[in-house]
Image (tube, coloured by chain):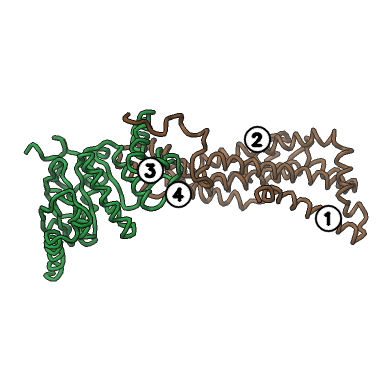
Chain colours: A brown, B green
Amino acid sequence: MRALRMASPLFAVLLVLGIWQLAVSALHAPSYVLPSPSRTWQALADDWENVRTLLGQTLYESVVGFVIGTAVGFLLAVAMAHAPLVHRVLYPILIASQAIPIVAIAAPLVIILGYGLAPKLVIVGLIVFFPVVVNVLDGLSGIDTGMVNLARSMGASATKIFLLVRLPATLAPLFSALKLAAAYAVTGAVIGEWTASITPGLGKDLLLKNSRLDTAGVYADVLLLTTVGLSGFLLMTILEHLFTPWRTRGTARRWLRRREPRYSKGS
Amino acid sequence: MTDSKLTIDRVEVRFDQTLALSETSLEVKDGEFITLVGPSGCGKTTLMNVIAGLQRPTSGRVMMNGSNIADKPGNVGYMFQKDLLIPWRTVTGNIVLGAALTGRATKSDRAAARQLAARYGLGDFVDHYPHALSGGMRQRVALMRTLAFHKDVLLLDEPFGALDAQTRLEMQQWLLEVWADSGRTVLFITHDVDEAVFLADRVVVMSARPGRIQAVHEVTVPRPRTVDTLMTPEFMDLKSQVLSGLYHHKEAK
């Protein structure tokens, strides 16, 4: 049963490939409209040397943008939860930042920051920070006031209460946000490359191949980008399991338990 | 008086214009078990919050060991109706919470917590997270957390209110056992007159609007008390006294 459960994502991949192949054969689509999976694979293999370095570039933008965006989002949420004034001032700005079409602010960003890495990081950051702010804020404000009162009754300082009661309560919602953000980060990097870049990357490469009607190459790039996004999501899921074990387990992991006897007889 | 542990001295609490607790005084002896009963709004919890230092009294003092502990949290152990176990801490982690919050939970704190858990029947659950425990077990852990905070005075605010009748009776007996072992002074809030009489050395009956102490009943029923105690004429007699106090007072209003 367990093996079956582990293998089920593999079935999903096979299913998608099957439908894809079926569509190609059934529609008799020319390869510049809809290349078959095998053609796409071939295109990927043929262009691998080139694509590999571009992938590295896009990965770099996604990861750095993700780290900066989520860190800023987390700090903003903590600041907003602590000071109602900061919350009242920042919240409308945050909402507005999400209402701005990212593509539209790419131009001014380039004017300010140039064509280098910076505008791309800003774009990725803008996309990923929002779910983090919203979720962490929920985690901080949704905490049981009884728990805080309990800690206060024990004479705990505000710092201790924050570190031991409030902060860990944000972990579960934080990881929900990080999973979304990991998937969005790649989208952000591609948009960044399309709108604010002269440096190469997978997104840029995709445009180039599109203009050459190299559809199989485009699909190959899309496949790679999807893989990056999925890997990010998967990594966050693994980290979530590691860092919030109480949500999925009844007992603490063995290697996380302090090394002590279970109980000593007569102290 | 030397054997007085806690002195509630003319404590009064107002919220704006509302008098939540009118001038209240009570002497609590060292090692005494006091239960407080009364309708909602009689100021029981307000009084507890004052003793715990969570609520500043409008006037009056709470004296313990010669100093005023009103508005000074951290001097007594406080247990709430909800167990308030921290979901990301194991049973051991929850028991040592007081040490962790006020300094550092040392190795010996954790060892002591495990020993406490083992002694009171949770030895196999020390590495469990709270969500994997039953309601009764969670309340036990909450009480162990309060005990492990090492304070002479324990405030228990309806700790068994959310439990089913059977578990509640077990927990009451267990609490008496723990209390006898530890020699702590206990103030225990309840709605349940049976529970109040069963546990207490003295039952304090409170009434509402404004919250105040209406009567104090000495419980002379000998210890140790068991389920059979609940059927003795002595117990019944005291229970009816407390009940009629609560009931007739309402009639008079």
Give the side of residue B46 with respect to residue A183, left or right. Answer: left
Callout 1 crowding tier (Cα within 10 Å): few <14, some 14–19, many ≥20: some
- At mark 3, the secondary structure is loop
Q: Measured from the top left, where is residue A184 in percent x and y?
A: 66, 46
B125 in relation to B197, above or below: above
Q: Are marks 2 and 1 in contact (CB under 8 Å)?
A: no
- At mark 1, the secondary structure is helix
Q: CA distance from mark 4 to mark 2?
A: 37 Å
Residue placed under numbered mark 3 in the picture: B122
Q: Measured from the top left, where is residue B45 in percent x and y?
A: 24, 53
In the orientation shown, which residue stands out farthest toward the front? B228
Query: Would residue A185 be visible to someone looking at this image?
Result: yes
Q: What chain is tagged by disc 3?
A: B
Residue kind at label 2, given as amino acid type = Val
Residue placed under numbered mark 1 in the picture: A20
Callout 4 crowding tier (Cα within 10 Å): few <14, some 14–19, many ≥20: some
Residue kind at label 4, given as amino acid type = His
B129 or A182, which lies in front? B129
